[in-house]
Amino acid sequence: MRRFITKRTALILIAVVLFLIAWNRNINLLYGMFAILTSLIILSHLLPRYAIKGLIVTRTLQPVAFEDDEIEVKIYVEKNAWTKGYMIEITDSMPAAGPSFQKPMVFIAKLPVKRKQEFSFKTVCYKRGVYSVGPISVSSAYPLGIVSVNKPADNARKTLTIYPKLFSIASFPLVAGTTMPMSGTEAMAKSGGNEDFFGTREYRQGDSLKFIHWPSTARHGQLIVKEFEIRASTEVTVLMDLHKDSCTGTGRETTLEYAVKIAGSVARFAIEKGHHVQFIGYGEKKHVVPSARGIDQLAFILDVLAKVQADSTVPYHRAITMSAGLLRDGGTVVLMFSRLDSNIRDYVYPMGILRSKRIKPVCVFLNDKSFQGDVSAPEHDEKSPGTRFVHEFIKEFASEYPSVYFVSKGDNLQDVFAV
Amino acid sequence: MNKIKYSPVYIGMYFLLVSAILAVQSTRNGAVMTLVYTAAWAIIYGIGLICGWQYKEKGTKAFVIITNVLAVFALVVFLASFVFSGVVDGLIACLLWLQAGRNFTISLRRDIFYTYFVSLILILYASSISKATVFVFFIILYVLAGMFTFMAEHLDERISYASGGDRDTLTKGMHLPVKGGVLSLMTLAIAAVIFLIVPMFPSPHIQSFPSVGGWSYRNVWQKRRKGEKKDTGRGENAFLGLQVFNGTVRAGKGKTTKSVEHKPTFKEMYNGFKKKFDITSPGRCMLSNRIVFYLQADRPLYLRGKIFDSFNGRVWKNSSNGSETVLINKGVFTFDIFTYEKEAEEGGVGQVYTIERNMPDIIFTAYKPLKLWFPGDAVQKEYDLSLRASGYLHSGTIYSVLSEIRDVDGRQTGGWEPLDRADLHRYLQLPKRLPEKIKKLAWSVAGSVKSNYEKAEVVEHYLKTHYTYTLATIFEKPKGDPVSYFLFQRKEGHSEYFASSMVVLLRTLHVPARLVTGYYAAHYNPITGYYEVRELDAHAWVEAYVNYAWITFDPTPGFQCPLPHHAHGYLIASALMRYLKNRFRIAGMTNRETRWVKALQKTQNSFDRVAMFLKKAWMIFKEHIWVWLKSIGIIGLIGGLFAAVIAVVIHFILQPAFDLLRLKRMKNKDPEKFIIHCYWAMERCFKRKGVPRPRSCTPGEYGTDLTVRYRHLAGQIRTITGLFQLAVYGAYALNTVDIENAYQAYKEIEFGRHTGRK
């Protein structure tokens, strides 16, 4: 609701009261005050129109930024009229900025005629997303701030993509799942990986016969196989839960935002290590970035991560099942559980599929209770359904590769993933 | 909370408060004391605001204590002022000290509004009581300070919200982006125009009449009767014959608040207010421009002071000895008059007098006073309804009068009033040694006229037309009979000569008449809204008893009997012209041959000459050229030329509408032609907006330039330019959709209408 008592209404009221007193008491000096106030009110209505007349405003800004980055927006202003501009306010619409900074304003005290001038302001990108910046409007309340005249200056909108803020990951268990005996070794990022002799051991069922080291077999009287140090690259799939109930919390402190940050950071880590990375998320629209390597792939993934919203009706266990066909055998999948009150039985089938494809899951459990304001961590409260789900899940599906992370609201993700 | 960031806000507040204090002090003190008091307050407020700035920066607790202490002090001052000076003084003092305390802790933007409020109260109070023209400059000063504060506060507010631009430049030091000179001049010029044209309708006077105040006057006549005449404290001014009791006057609530140590002597006072009045020496005050009192009334008036009935050829005196003490009754003095009627009261003329300079004990009123609101408990009423106070009227005294004034045949009268035979005899008294030639003159002028009224009229007209008004005679002391000297020798003189001559002539013709002295209050100051009554407005006129009523006659040339239609009118502009003219006249009359008066007179003469020239030119045109034009039938040609000029002007104004109409008609015709015309119309539109197409620029380049300049119209410009290029250079056949698109695009460019086309 607009304020009724503004400077303008107050001045008009005072002018009217002065006129009435002057009329009633025949005091012409009060007529004089009334005349001056009326003159001020008239000028306050007229001058702002001339102040913003003939203004040409354009804006430039970078198309992409990361969350919490400070970006500089440049505004070019030219006054194409015969009068100078005074007290001009150029207001941009910057939805990417924080809640109270979405209407940044550049204040120009004096603008000369027919000279293009550059002004700039800095804004901090508050939250990832794809934003339409603009329109720009100009206004002026010259000279006394009594009446403000506003008009659109530049309707052209620009798109600003804000990527999620990424954090550094020191190490992440990307596990190679090639044919035995290479399985179980840590995948290293090295292009054109080769095989170096590592040692020998006893034959185990399932080992390929071509790796039998016959001289040692002869010496020991039992089958001995050669072991090689594997330098191989693997495929990492980041699978996000975009079910509409999976987003808990408000603003930037939601499970989805944390998950997006983790996904982006893991993707960057894997790509930096030279792995293939793909991203899958079943939102209202299917978000799939096919497996690839290189910095462009990271850009593709970040583009998608900037857009994803928890807006689908596909539950996470179903998303795992649906995405199984896109996962390469022996790869690594990063699973992010945003709800810890799920039923463990729902995951039996999808996890079975992953196991059958020798896909190693890395599980990230997001403590949704903490995002609702519950400070007790489920991993310490054994009776909570969340704890039960986590324990059962680990016991059931992740005992072989205990790559599990717990994230609560307010955690320093860099520390969490440093372990 | 929004803290003040822009330091000029403090300067603005300082000047706002100081200008308001200056205005208030100017209404209460003389020039010197005004400056002294204002300087003292300016220092107090300056220190306070500097501390306020420090408080904003550091939050020093000591300043909060000072604020609280001064708030308590303000309350004490209020109570003290309330007891000794009255509630208004108490409130003003309280406000000033409260603000003084508040200054120490001003840090937030909302605090500025408190300053606005206090200063507005002060200036309104000062405006309501000030009667000086110079007060306009204080108002202007206050408004300029207010504008500065408003601007600074606006800048402060915008800077606090700004993310960039000139924010940092402005917050560093005292950087003011706007030069206020032109802005101030514009504001004042528009204000002057509004002030001059604003209509001033007749006032309803709701709760504004009567007005009484200033000083209080004791009933001295009652004491005299009780034998308290020995009171040594009460002096008597023998020179004037005026009662001045100890110079002590009493103010509100009946308590003595001020003692005037020196008894006023009124040495330069108009002699017509004395008991005996020598018409040859009215006094030097006739050349004095000093304001005696201010009158607030709806019309110009004759204000009666003293009435004289007995004349010895040189000196007038009042021979009646019937005076009566009238006591206040329910706050008002009501005079027992035969003609008093309820209707008369309702239709009476209200007057509010504000005494500017100490005056004799005469209570000036317009004839005939019905009611008087006076700050005293008794006044004295003479037989002829002239009124006296118990002491001299002190500067600052305010009193109100309601008079019954009837305008009969362009003259004022107080209505029907019986007169007994003895009184008639008094008003027919003639000097013992009246020259025979005066009698002859009287009979020769009006002897043939039958009615008394006509006789008076004829005599008045004779004097007005055969004699000249001058102030040069006030220093002359003619020997012999002064009236005879005036009528037959000098044939010019001051108003007392005229009035005395008329009374003598009328009495010779057996028409009862009397001489009245007082003030001619006809100089309305449109800037303040008050009639300014100056010492040189002292005047003498005649009241003749005709048809059972005293009717006012003024035989002095240049003086008109003031009537309601002589009032200032609805517009200040016309009243201001009259006021300025009168001021020039007075300046010339009082021989103030200063440079500026001469310059102003020259300017006025120049304007008069130009006005005269234009008037003559108009008369010549009307009487000769116009007649000749009519006779030769050229009027049609002139009319045609005038119509053509009007048509060109209208065409220029309505060109966009014409263009649109033309295009609408062409829509169903040749598409290529339509598009070309549409493009031309667009070019004309942008030419009007100040962006014409340079000759060196192709339509494509021009279109590109326009899209950069007018981004919000980029689509429309591209549509029309593209279609134009296709129409002129392309092989593409334009269709109806293209035409419609171009038409809609043009409409949006020209009229800014969004027709929903995508």
Image (tube, helix red, strand yellow):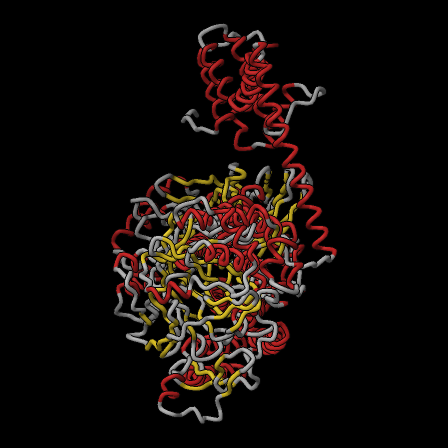
Residue A282 seen anywhere in this rendered image of the structure: yes
Q: Can you name the residue that lies furthest to the front here?
A: B436
* Residue B718 versus residue A384 in the image, above or below: above
A213 or A393, which is in the foreground? Answer: A393
Total number of numbered labels? 0
Which residue corresponds to the image point at 43% horizontal and 91% vertical from the top-left?
B229
B560 or B308, which is in the foreground? Answer: B308
Which residue corresponds to the image point at 48% horizontal and 29% vertical from the top-left?
B752
Percent x, y of residue B292:
54, 67
* Residue A345 versus residue B103 in the image, above or below: above
Percent x, y of residue B308:
47, 67
Residue A185 seen anywhere in this rendered image of the structure: no
B45 or A331, which is in the foreground? Answer: B45
Q: Is residue A361 left or right of residue B48?
A: left
Percent x, y of residue A260:
44, 52
Q: Can you name the residue that lies furthest to the right here?
A: B595
Q: Is residue B368 left or right of residue B734?
A: left
Which residue corresponds to the image point at 56% horizontal and 52% vertical from the top-left?
B579
Q: Is residue A411 left or right of residue B191?
A: left
